[in-house]
Image: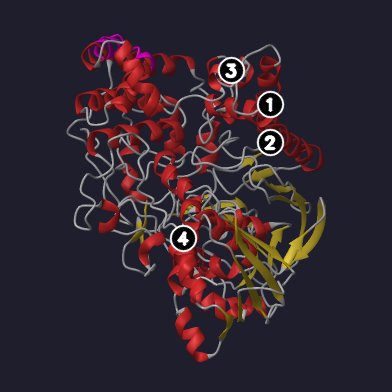
Amino acid sequence: MPSNSIYKSIMSFVIVLLLSSISFAAGGGKIVKADPSKHFDPKGKMPSEFTIKLQNGLRKSLPFEDKRDFEEAQKGFIAAPDYKQIMAEAGHVAWDMGSYEFLLTDKEYESIHPSLQRQAVLNMAYGLYEVMPDKIYQIRGYDLANITFIKGDKGWIIFDPLTAKETAAAALKFINEQLGERPVTAVVYSHSHADHFGGVRGVVDEADVRSGKVPVIAPVGFMDHAVSENVYAGNAMTRRLFYQYGVLLPRSPFGHVDQSIGKNTAAGNLGLIPPTVIVEDDFEEMTVDGVKMVFQNTPGTEAPAEMNTYFPEWKAFWAAENITGTVHNIYTLRGALVRDALKWSKGINAALYHFGKEAEVMFASHSWPRWGNDRIQEVMRAQRDIYANLNNEVLHLANQGVTVNEIHNVYKPPKSLQEQWAAHSYHGSEEHNSRAVVNRYLGYWDANPATLIPLSPKDSAPLYVEMMGGAEPIIKKGQELYAEGKYRHAMEILNKLIFAEPDNQVAKDLLADVYEQIGYQQESPSVRNSFLAGAYELRNGIPAGASPKTSGPDMISAMTTELWLDFLGIRLDSKKADGTEFTINLVTPDNGEKFVVELSNATLTNIEGFQADDADLTVTIDRDDLEQTMMGAISMDDQIKSGKAKLVGDRKLIDQLKGMLVQFDIGFEILPGTAPKDLTPEKNPFAQEPPAINAITD
């Protein structure tokens, strides 16, 4: 069994990996604002003539005359609070809607794709909204997601209580102030992403849940996926999240403007109270606090565990995150398993034929509701068809030889879908989603032997640079291409140069200029943020304060012992472990679990339900006590001294295993030459404000 520091390292690390669709405020909760009239970076560039020409052309070609989304986004508005910030219990700003107020003008920003600016304005909705009179209400603009309040016979049934305890509590307080105090009688988690359950402790007391007074309802598989989806590759995902979600970027027309399904994510206390009612069937009817609901399980769509809900007596359809004001990610740029676009389309189609034919209102965990059956069917069909078209047309092209490295330059939705806002890709993009479909069915290889075992960029780049005559002609050509507006061509050669010469700041600054113009031109904030974050790091290095902050006890309690042991295997340094072999039995009597953990062939494996007769060490500790050590509340040494952890065998194996485990660093380079040169605690930005992964390690 690993030592206390290993427990704390593993478990505190896992906490930051669980937010599968969210972002964090830059600066560890410090909201970074900038003057919208000028660039926040001294090296930053204004939009080029080519970017301006593109944006002006889009303003003429996109269907801006269709203003129904704006009407729907404001329909039912009741009140907004007199505050724009919500503070976290730790004292920092958990949420700041005011940081995006530069969008609330008539100014057309040339540094923002016109369609994205439109979406960013739509997501500025803030306050309490009525979805259905005296029945359904939403508070929007308090977090990445909406929190929905269903009026039951006795109190509020809450759908998706946001990311953070603080924002959820503020939302409950505000609706009670506006509509009268009502108790919470049930909570529904629509799916397994943390912006839909993390604020649960702000709206309900766990004692009321455990007693059965307040049921918590969730789809089958919820707990497994809520904890496990992002663990194994979590350090890499967290670092990549800084790009997709632009968490290092100031909120500015030249930086972060939106997150497509909402403005951003609250940086408060993340919690999880396990559900007490699991929806297992494809369609399952239930009455909760006098309200009849029909749940539709849609696993493998937007989340591995997700469900829609229909209110037949009210003809109201809750679309969870399956149908929102954007085409979502088939492949999430921070990293995740590729989703199934066809299955997603079929899930929407099932909802259309079961509920959509009669629904009079459709509302969801993001974006705004739609009213009227014709409008509802229009949006459902648009999103059904865009996911199906993405799957079918990409495979149609792939079957004619278009490869994963070409498809993003070839695939385009049909014109009829391009003319419908509900089929536009904000959270996803046509480019990276089309590549994802090919990857799902055919993998990452394009069948060209030259790309099957390619050189690493740092090895191939010097060859390219040498053949192009060195840095000087590459920079000259890059400047020419930039001046001609051929940004992707410039990117191709400058990227080679910076991998060959990571310290060539002239090349990095020029590539940053290129990235910036590409970013300005993107409809998808995920793609925009990725290019702008790359530009930021090329110019300045990895900045300080890029530390995701979350709370951890609930997640640790929900994590299975097997998942934790699996992650130990990922952290093992096989070079240090080579030549060492041992077997450890782990027993947690209070929940009846038994594991064998083996180190052999420089690989750590585990199996549940067995014990080795010849184990070198047996550790017996109740799971409840183990969780205390995982949380850092009680050290393993203290558990042993108190008799709560009993050891039989070679105690030295704990320290031996500890020495073989790697402490992952979120601050690894994505682009060459961007990491701090001086890694002392005074100079290292990740040491200045340590991420949760490292905060309680030792």
Residue at the (72%, 74%) spot, across then down: 613
In the picture of the structure, the residue carrying the numbered disc 3 is: 449
Residue under the point 38% across and 18% down: 492
Q: Which residue is mark 2?
A: 340
Residue of label 4 = 660
Q: Amino acid at mark 4?
A: Met
Q: Is residue 514 above or below residue 122?
A: above
Q: Residues within 10 Å of mark 4 (few under 14, many from 20)?
A: some
Q: Residue beneath label 1, please?
A: 391
Residue type pointed to by label 1: Asn
Tell me which numbered mark, 4 or 3, is placed earlier along the sequence. 3
View extreme (left): residue: 42
Look at the image and give the residue range highlighted in magenta: 476-490
First reached walking from the N terminus: tag 1 or tag 3 = 1
Closer to the eye: label 4 or 1 = 4
Question: Earlier along the polypeptide chain: callout 3 or callout 2?
Answer: 2
Q: Earlier in the sequence, mark 1 or mark 2?
A: 2
Q: Is 286 within the magenta? A: no
Type of amino acid at the residue the image marks with label 2: Asp
Which of discs 1 and 3 lies nearer the camera? The answer is: 3
Tell me the mark number nearer the camera, choosing from 3 and 2. 3
In this view of the protein, can residue 406 be seen by the observer? no
